[in-house]
Amino acid sequence: MDWEGPLSWRGEKRRRSDELCRRGVFRHMMSPNQRKFHELLDQPGIYEAGLFCSRKFGKSFSAFLYEMELCMRGRNVLVRHVMGELKQCKDVLFKVYDELKEFVPMSVLPTLIKSEASFYFPATGSYILLGGTKPENIESSRGPRANHLALDEVASFDASNYDYALESVLFPQLSTTAGKIAHYTTPPESPQHPWIAKHYAKMLSKGSLLTFDFDQNDVLTENAKLAILERYTTPQHPSPRDNPGFRREYLCELIANIDRRVVPEFDVEQHVYKGDPLAPFRDERGPFTNVVAHISGDHGIVDNTVLLLGYVDWRSAILYITKEIVLRGKDECYLSNLAAVIRELQQEAVQHSEELVTQLDCFDAIRVSLMKDHGITAVMPTKHNLEGGIGVARTALTDGKVQIHESCRQLITELTYSMWKTSESDVRKIERTDLTSHSDALMSFVYMLRRVSWTRRPGSQKTLDLGGRRR
């Protein structure tokens, strides 16, 4: 049976509702599952709780009702309700305020102060203050204290500003009040959003996270649900519950948005192999007579340095990535360690191939030092046109020309989770996250593919020495 919201209440039911509102009680206007979350938030010992829900659950509506209760029951209460952008927060909460006028006594409603993006409760001197967490908004959300903090659509907050906004600006305001934090959100576009790593898992383990998916959404009517299912039914996904968009937005599954994935063609089942890394291209007539070896690296300035070893099998026209090395941190021995790793990879490569190309994206000073001090020669990869290079990788994966050994975990992770950064600029950039760092393994992969020749048989032309120069 569909839940009947307060708009449908008439007669005695409406009268009883009005009386509860005048006493500062609004819980009865929430749906049963909305109430469950706020009852959890009220429990002693719970200082942080999360509502992880499907679209159209009414999370902002129920959050505002809860905040009104806090402001009407206590004096000089300050509630901060923030979203990713201040404009978005005002648009959503101003609309909720207008909706409440239809079924809440006007004498109970707070005063909306649009110029300050706030709601004022004259009887108690309390405020609900709206804010945004983007760099251009967050400083205006500073304050000496807050009694309650509502993080609305927190899994959509700008990842690059996430830690600063929450840990440096918002959370300290609760230090003297023992106020609580309420997380309200639908699933993020990327499973690697910092909210997942920093708060989702923590609240889940503590039992302070409630999840309500499409089937548990008690706000949507059955007709509304049927209409949503119809919208997500496509020729590619005859069953909407197989549609990645529906699974993320309505079933609350942590699935990357394919529109923002840098390499959406990559699939672990299709492109990752197990067992002996060299087995796929051994030749019964002689070992490795049809392969060209490639070493490709991306030198991180403050990020990881990742080196990949791969072999192109001329017979099958497939690139096999057999090994990855990830170097973290920079100290006085860093260049020596880097040189030692490259030399080890080169020695391994020449055992299995008559030809080898080594390329490393790094500063000229590092390249010169590697050559003069350590005898390591590496050519500079082709770097222009990032999207063009990514396109080469996507085409190779689509055409079945790449196999990656299961031991290359960083590369597999970055191919799976690297996302384009949302930007108003025409220049696309890859988003930096805790898991993918600066996608250094992905870039090493791209550099290697740009140097690969799929059609040239090994030995048919002058070969390349360890650094990629003609012999």
Image (cartoon, rainbow, N blue to C red):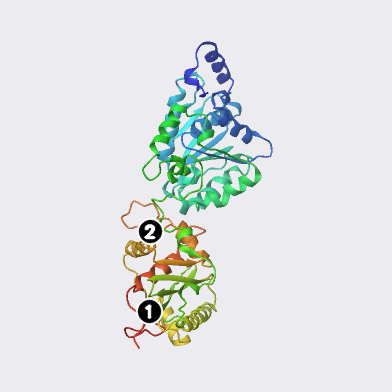
Mark identifier at residue 75: none
Q: Which structural element holds mark 1?
A: loop
Up the image or down, 119 lies above or below 261; here it is above
> How far across and down, in percent of the image, does residue 211 sit?
56, 39
Q: Disc 1 and disc 2: Cα gap in Å?
A: 24 Å
Which badge, 1 or 2, comes first in the chain's sequence?
Answer: 1
Give the residue at mark 2: 429
Residue 86 vertical position relative to residue 425 in the rendered view, above or below: above
Image coordinates of residue 23 in percent, x first then y, are 59, 20
- What is the count of numbered marks? 2
Above or below, 273 against 457 in this view is above
Residue plotted at (43% across, 35% down): 229
Q: Which residue carries the number 1 mark?
A: 379
Disc 1 vs disc 2: which is toward the camera? Answer: 1
SS assignment at label 2? loop
In the depicted view, which residue is nearer to us: 200 or 245? 245
**Among all residues in the image, which is located at the extreme front?**
285
Q: Is residue 469 left or right of residue 145?
A: left
Amino acid type indicated by mark 2? Lys
Quadrant location of residue 41? top right
The local crowd at label 1, few if under 14, some if 14 to 19, many if 20 or more residues have their Cα within 10 Å, is some
Identified by mark 1, the residue type is Val
Q: Residue sitting at 50 percent across and 73 percent down?
A: 279
The answer to whether residue 125 is left or right of residue 362 is: right
Q: Residues within 10 Å of mark 2 (few under 14, many from 20)?
A: some
Residue 216 position within the rendered picture, expressed as x and y whole percent measured from the top left: 54, 33
Residue furthest out toward the top = 11
The residue furthest bottom is: 471
Q: Where is residue 49 in the image (x, y as percent from the top left)?
A: 60, 40
